Image (cartoon, coloured by chain):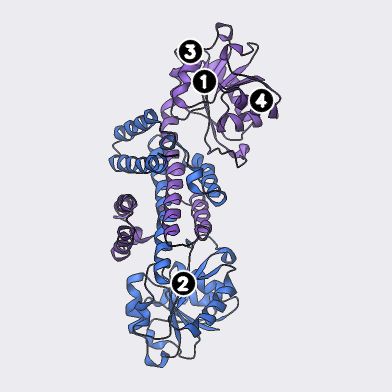
Chain colours: A purple, B blue
Amino acid sequence: MRISLIGSGRVATHLAQALAQQHEIVNIYSPTLINAQQLAESVDAIAIDQLSALVPDLDLIIIAVKDQAILACVEQLDSALAQVLVVHTSGSTDLSVIATHHPRAGVFYPLQSFSFEREIDWSQTPILIETAQSKDQTLLLELAKSLSERVYPYNSQQRLSLHLAAVFASNFSNYCYDIAAQIVQQQHVDFDLLKPLIVETALKATQQAPDNAQTGPARRGDVQIIAQHQALLAQQQQHAFADIYQIMSQGIIERHKLS
Amino acid sequence: MRISLIGSGRVATHLAQALAQQHEIVNIYSPTLINAQQLAESVDAIAIDQLSALVPDLDLIIIAVKDQAILACVEQLDSALAQVLVVHTSGSTDLSVIATHHPRAGVFYPLQSFSFEREIDWSQTPILIETAQSKDQTLLLELAKSLSERVYPYNSQQRLSLHLAAVFASNFSNYCYDIAAQIVQQQHVDFDLLKPLIVETALKATQQAPDNAQTGPARRGDVQIIAQHQALLAQQQQHAFADIYQIMSQGIIERHKLS
């Protein structure tokens, strides 16, 4: 397939590099030309900083930009691109954001946490697809399967619930790690000590339901330890962390009160 | 060394089985004899359900019971055991809980999440030790090093801060997974889809500081997506999850507002 990418951030970078193994990347667009150039060079594509410069002879345009910027990109597409399938990569943006302006619309959402520092195992990364026109589903399915063994057609509502769940499972768990790092730092204790625990907890969740794997003072109803932890947080003036400790512990206690 | 264990739960089980590779396990105590017997059989020890039945010819007694039960165990130890080093395995219990009743007191705290279903990589599990008498530190250090390459003498305050941090890094991150599982279940979406993301997020935290690794709508300041997620939670009547979403997002926004 001949594919152009709008965007040069984390998702665009990982996608372009993975797709370039099997497909032709034509253009990489970024409003900042140097960013587009950097990515374009690595995938043998042509960098552009104007959407009007997109080569129209394409099978697919992938919009991998911030959610709020998707609509503006769609609105700027040239009429010469009217016959090209255009997809976004967002978990929480409705298909209609593209479809109301461009009939051949779709979503190509890779459910993974992308960073510049780490490679992605694409074959195990779930890709959720959705298309406005059923004939386009075949094309998008084929593309997704060229990257991943785990491709799922889901509607916008299901995708939104998955993205919301991913915020808890990834963004909020990472924030828990960050709080832990701040707590030990205050006592001059090395955060490295917590790393085996972090990895073990995540691996455990892949083997058993997280409610069965739940441990800790709140799960045991150990009010004495909870009080000690709250006292330490108060002593360290970490009132925001104390509030989070409280609400999370309460949630765990409620969740398990009948078991 | 000749070691007896008080307790037959997750920590006692993993410890007994790891120690039995290189040391002699003499007694396993549980108030429920069948529990003690089950573990004792696997490590070639003698099960007891009375603390007075502990064989006194020992180098070490490990108390691996619920935090609130430690004191009662120490108080019941026979005077024939006065010369034996007695340690507990708790992250948040002060050394003094043993030391005020038994001068040869210590702490042997393995910082890991134990479950019956999964094996532990002991060589990489941090073990935190503390002793009331400096001569006992050598003994406990030697024992800890027979299991792990990562042994640290820390005082009770540092250990408390590590345990508190571990509650965030492990118990609360697991609760985030549990919430995610409940959210997708309501839309008949498979929780398995989130597993690569969970593991990747944890592995990332071992390679870069969690604050640098933070992603998601709160990190990007994407108020539109945050509002959509809140609306979905309200629609699903998940008000407790909405409160957690709010407080965690606020924390992430505050954390990164200057970056």
Amino acid marked by disc 4: Ala
**Mark number displayed over residue A106:** 1
- The residue mark sitting in front, 1 or 4, is 4
Vertical placement of residue B213 versus B18, above or below: above
Using the image as rendered, state which of residue A109 and residue B244 is in the foreground: B244
Q: How far apart are the two marked residues, 3 and 2, measured between alpha carbons?
A: 63 Å
Which of discs 4 and 3 lies nearer the camera? The answer is: 4
Query: Separation of disc 2 and disc 4 at Cα?
Result: 56 Å
Chain of the residue under label 4: A
Q: Which residue is mark 3?
A: A75
Q: Chain of mark 3?
A: A
Q: Please tell me which residue is depicted at 49% across the width and 77% down the height of the picture.
A: B40
Crowding around mark 1 (Cα neighbors within 10 Å: few <14, some 14 to 19, many 20+) is many
Q: Amino acid at mark 3?
A: Glu
Answer with mark 1 or mark 4, whichever residue precedes in sequence.
Answer: 4
Point out residue B224 in the picture as x, y percentages from the top left corner: 37, 28
Report, in whole angstroms, how far the alpha carbon at label 2 lies from the one at label 1: 54 Å
Q: Position of residue B247 (x, y in %)?
A: 33, 43
Q: Quadrant of residue A84?
A: top right
Q: Position of residue A71 (x, y in %)?
A: 46, 18
Q: Which quarter of the rendered picture does the N terminus of chain B lie within?
A: bottom right
Between circles 3 and 2, the one closer to the viewer is 3
According to the picture, the residue beneath numbered tag 4 turns out to be: A40
Any part of residue A215 in sight: no
Q: Nearer the viewer, residue A119 or A236?
A: A236
Residue where numbered disc 2 is placed? B12
